[in-house]
Image (cartoon, helix red, strand yellow):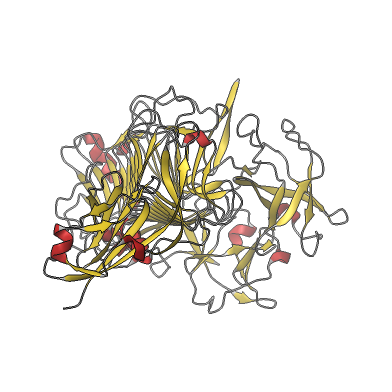
Amino acid sequence: MNTAIGKGAAVLVVVAWGVATGWAAAPVGSITSPAGPGPLPEADFYVATEGKDTNPGTAAAPFATLTRARNAAREKVAAGLTRNLLVLIRGGTYPQADTLAFGPEDSGTEEHSVTYAAAPGETVVLSGGRRITGWKKGDGEVWTAEIPGVKAGKWYFRQLFVNGQRAIRARTPNRGWCDGRPVQPIQQDRPQDPVVIRIKVAGGVAAWRNPEDIELAYVRNNDGGRKALQSIDAAAQTITLRPPHRWAPKCFGFDWYNGVPDGRCYLENALEFLDSPGEWYLDRTAGVLSYWPRTGEDLSQCAVVAPVVQNTLLAVAGTRQRPVLNLHFRGVHVEHVDWPLPDNGFMGLFSCNVPVFREGGDPGHRFIEAAVEIAHARSCSFRDGAIGRVGAMGLVLREGTAGIAVEGNHIQQTGAGGIGLGHCNVAAGYLKAAPPPEPGEYERFRVCNNYIHHCGSDYHGGTGIAVYRMKHSTISHNLVHDTAYFGICFGGDQDPKWNFVQGNTLERNHIHHAMQVTQDGAGLYVCFAHAGGKNLIRGNLIHDTSANNASAGLYLDSACAGVTFDHNVIYRNPSMAIILNRKEDLAKNTWTGNLVLSGRDEAPPEEFVEAMKAHAGLEAAYRKTLQGTDPQPCELHVLEGGEGSAWQFDFPAQGRGVLYWVNAQPATGKAVGLKPRNLDPAARYTLKAYSGQVQPTLAPGDGRLHFPMARKIGPAPGLGVPESATGRDLLDKGVTLKDGAGVIWISYQRARQ
């Protein structure tokens, strides 16, 4: 049997935030931090799990559903707003059977907002899933549950979550890849032709049951695809993919077909593959779900949930003529959304984009569907909430959007990417999106203080934040890790004459463990021209990208130009530190104070790494709400550095910090003095100096040194830094370095009194 999820179901991380009486949505240009619980604010309508839709929607007699509250708010909008409108949602899980859609009739105005907000200190979950119960012990370690809706053909799902964790759709091999290649070349323009793939897998291809339910998942360079099977030939060790086929076009008009299987792959969704804890299989004919519990899981107690809602759970969609204005969601958690595999399968291009074919023109591309979708909307926001346990993208800002804020959210366990935004037009003059941007769209975005991780479990172009053409926008203070593909992608203009991409800042993001599945990418990937001016990438921390082929910390591609790279830190990226599509890309961009460690296993001094992790990533208030930590404040001081660049990271409450000096010039023997700030004049400080061997990075043709590639990091007693000094001496006289070439760190710690 299956039941709707109740209050006892597992939910995403709690995000508590304070709302004062008369609360109104913050303007897009500001950063607001979550606070502790406050008094219940006055609202126009209230929603609670114990309410009734026949109620008037007051605090004493609330509605039961957001649909009813939306309809009530819609009536007030139709009558004309004279003040901000607030719908307050009490904590609990609200099951959704379909997409909750908002259109122009739900819009605020330029003067007055419409807001749907969780009550202070309470967790609101919109769940598109059903809880599955009635488990029985089956053969061996496998348990089964009968689902009548599946047997009747009314329900089929591709995702399963046990106590909030994604279960593994039964596959072979259990980890890694087998080899699959077409027996004959694939004809791109013949969608009904048989496509036969020869598979080399441990145990061999067998006459597995229900072959039409089995899927071939594969990776081709930086994305891949997924196709259902039509038949199996065990004697020939081949499988035949089910038509129709609509293969992705060549990505660059002359290059590889990303959508064509050719090498790394695995087979998924057969009962015979169910051989490990955490795996599951759904027999759609018998209506039976089989699951092998992980250690410690008791299915009589576990919350086992599968999605019912497909594609999108929360949608905001206006029109070009009537965009949605000033509509806000705060503290809302969205989870359990499926993405059904299209009849022609999935063929990714990059970052979970798929082709958009057009009559008489080159194909464009778009993001696949997201759990939260926003299109033709201005000055709206999704803040302090969460998106997780979904089959495709987490959140996408599509055409007609501007002035949208996505801040303070926890986005995790997505089948595809985390966040996608901007005008999708990024493939070398061939995959041309249409129409071109309208005046006022794709601008003034804020994507800040989001915690994004474990993206791309099903569609391996999954990117933490995929940013395409936009302007006057900020992507900052995000923590992104464990992504199948890029951590963050930042695309520019294909044609540098367009000058659309301008005024963007990407700063103080912390990216690590990207590129976990695909190749030919980086923790931070930047491509095409950013020639409109004032495009800044500053203070980002990028490390521990995977060792997959052609995976780097930073990747400049497709004539990247017009960007200022300032004080970014890149280390311990075992495949490559930096990839340049063209070496002259160094000279086409501006470089100040950047640090790149070339050694595969090397990292900067521990004191500096800790400071950079405090400087980049989530701001302190969001670390507390999204990660449950209570970080010590870290202040940045930019020091006078002469010919180089000097920063000071200071932990004032702990009396410690680190000075960071970068000078991308050859050794000159010239002494350099650095004066730290914010020290206690009466205290004594212990000092330690570090440096590394430096290999300057030259740009072909211009002879300029852009940044040092540092290696062999270690103590530097020869710099002349004393072992200790008083705070007064450091403030007045500073620290003198005998030679200010390369990269130098000086840590300081206040001595105990």
Label tally: 0
Q: Where is residue 388 drawn, in percent x and y?
A: 44, 57
Q: In this view, does 121 lie above or below 664?
A: below
Image quadrant holding the C terminus, namely: bottom left
Residue occupying image coordinates x 60% and y 62%: 148
Left or right, residue 5 beside residue 520? left
Q: In which quarter of the image is residue 566?
A: top left
Residue 91 in view: no
Front residue of 342 and 494: 494
Front residue of 656 and 388: 656
Q: Is residue 512 above or below residue 142?
A: above
Identity of the residue furthest to the left in this view: 682
Left or right, residue 306 beside residue 250? left
Residue 332 in view: yes
Q: Where is residue 731 drawn, in percent x and y?
A: 15, 59
Residue occupying image coordinates x 63% and y 56%: 152
Left or right, residue 4 beside residue 195? left
Q: Is residue 406 above or below residue 686?
A: above
Q: In which quarter of the image is residue 326?
A: top left
